[in-house]
Image: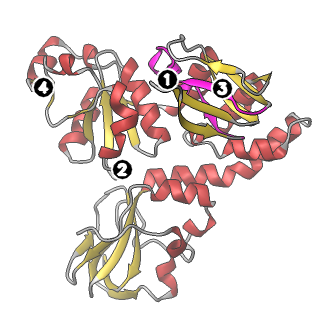
């Protein structure tokens, strides 16, 4: 059963979690819950590959090696600072000797966060060396952006060189609701206000500061702006055009999977389908067991999706599912895109696997 959500301060003694920055650790912990399990519960079995990294927070477990030797590990032991039986496939079976509290992370997500966090300092120094006139604080804030968590460091360096500076004044309108999306912006200096029209005047949705960004959602859905954005102070914006956004940021951040591999993962309980088409399109048939959440509603309703779940996102062509997977990835979800979408399937496959709502 699930217990209370974990506080990052509780992880300061665990390796290598204690090496993560506060921002990366908060990202990693999103959607995570402590599992409170009774004595006798099997936590993992020798020979299995579950893709999870397990930490013991309290209680004691028995670890049985391949030769049958059983070792007891208590949460207060020095060895408990490390993951329990971390190898994949597992080299030992682990069973709760007492009631325990444990925490499990998706191993790939943990590795990705560790790799990015540990490369940030080197990447920051490289960017400062390449652009000696830039402010190091601005670069550091930029690298903390969740947009870059799945991006190879080389792409970050190239992307940084594509940013175009635009001095802005207080009160200047940067984006208008309904305009076609052609670029996104990173705030180097200043504060911007996000608002939508209301009956009594503009309604403020958010204030964005140095290191934050805006305008990416319109690029992802290849549509129009959904809000007005204006400066509330003088400042400097860094503009990234759509072509560079697509090639350097969006495409490298996406993981694609073929239908046969995706179906195998779903049938094995390792992933779940996520249909991001419109309701009228879904009425013609969805993949069995799919969650249905149209792209237009994704940012508002994504909180309804459990974060511990892996999602294989699909639409008809793959375009909208790519946008959805990118947005969910920024929000901390583990996503893949069905390569080519449903239209890549043969007619016989669509007839076999698509079911009416």
Picture layout, residue 231 above or below residue 59: above
Residue 349: image x %, image y %?
A: 15, 19
Residue shown at the point (85%, 41%) measured from the top left: 135
For disc 1, the marked residue is 197
In three-dimensional space, the C-alpha distance between marks 1 and 4, rounded to whole angstroms, equals 44 Å
Q: Earlier in the sequence, mark 2 or mark 4?
A: 2
Q: Is residue 177 left or right of residue 37?
A: right
Q: Note whether residue 121 is visible.
A: yes
The disc label shown at residue 230, or none:
3
Q: Which residue is mark 4?
A: 353
Residue 225: say if magenta.
Answer: yes
The picture places residue 80, in percent across and down from the top left corner, at 46, 81
Q: CA distance from mark 2 to mark 4?
A: 26 Å
Q: In the image, which is nearer the foreground, mark 4 or mark 3?
A: 3
Give SS at disc 1: loop
- Contact check, label 3 and label 2, Cβ < 8 Å: no
* 1 or 2: mark nearer the eye: 1
Marked residue nearer the N-terminal end (3 or 2): 3
Q: Residue at x 55, y 60 (%)?
A: 25
- Count numbered badges in the picture: 4
The stretch in magenta equals: 210-233
- To which residue does mark 2 refer? 307
Q: Is residue 16 visible?
A: no
Mark 4 surroundings: few (<14), some (14-19) or many (≥20) residues within 10 A: few
> Which element carries disc 3, helix, strand or loop?
strand
Q: Earlier in the sequence, mark 1 or mark 4?
A: 1
53 or 241, which lies in front? 241
Which residue is at the front of the view, 136 or 244? 136
Q: Is residue 248 above or below residue 2?
A: above
């Amino acid at each position: 059963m699930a217990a209370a959500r974990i506080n990052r301060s509780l992880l300061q003694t665990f390796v290598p979690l204690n090496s993560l920055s506060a921002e990366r650790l908060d990202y990693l912990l999103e959607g995570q819950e402590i599992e409170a399990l009774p004595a006798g519960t099997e936590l993992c079995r020798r020979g299995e590959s579950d893709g999870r990294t397990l930490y013991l927070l309290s209680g004691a477990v028995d670890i049985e090696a391949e030769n049958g030797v059983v070792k007891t590990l208590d949460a207060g032991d020095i060895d408990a600072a490390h993951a329990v039986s971390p190898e994949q496939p597992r080299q030992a079976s682990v069973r709760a000797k007492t009631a325990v509290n444990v925490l499990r992370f998706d191993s790939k997500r943990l590795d990705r966060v560790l790799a990015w966090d540990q490369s940030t300092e080197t990447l920051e120094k490289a960017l400062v060396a390449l652009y000696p006139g830039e402010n190091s604080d601005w670069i550091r804030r930029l690298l903390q952006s969740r947009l870059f968590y799945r991006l190879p460091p080389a792409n970050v360096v190239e992307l940084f060189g594509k940013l175009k500076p635009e001095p802005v004044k207080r009160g200047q309108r940067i984006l208008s609701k309904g305009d076609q999306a052609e670029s996104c912006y990173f705030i180097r200096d200043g504060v911007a206000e996000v608002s939508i029209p209301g009956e009594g005047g503009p309604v403020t949705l958010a204030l964005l500061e140095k290191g934050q960004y805006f305008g990416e959602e319109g690029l992802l859905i290849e549509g129009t702006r959904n809000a007005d954005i204006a400066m509330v102070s003088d400042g400097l914006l860094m503009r990234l055009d759509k072509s560079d956004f697509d090639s350097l940021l969006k495409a490298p951040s996406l993981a694609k999977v073929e239908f046969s591999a995706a179906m195998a993962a779903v049938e094995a309980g390792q992933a779940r389908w996520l249909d991001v088409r419109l309701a009228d399109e879904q009425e013609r048939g969805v993949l069995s067991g799919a969650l249905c959440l149209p792209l237009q509603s994704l940012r508002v309703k994504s909180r309804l999706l459990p974060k511990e779940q892996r999602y294989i996102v699909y639409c008809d062509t793959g375009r909208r599912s790519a946008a959805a997977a990118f947005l969910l990835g920024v929000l901390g979800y583990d996503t893949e895109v069905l390569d080519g979408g449903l239209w890549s399937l043969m007619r016989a496959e669509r007839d076999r696997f698509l079911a009416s709502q």
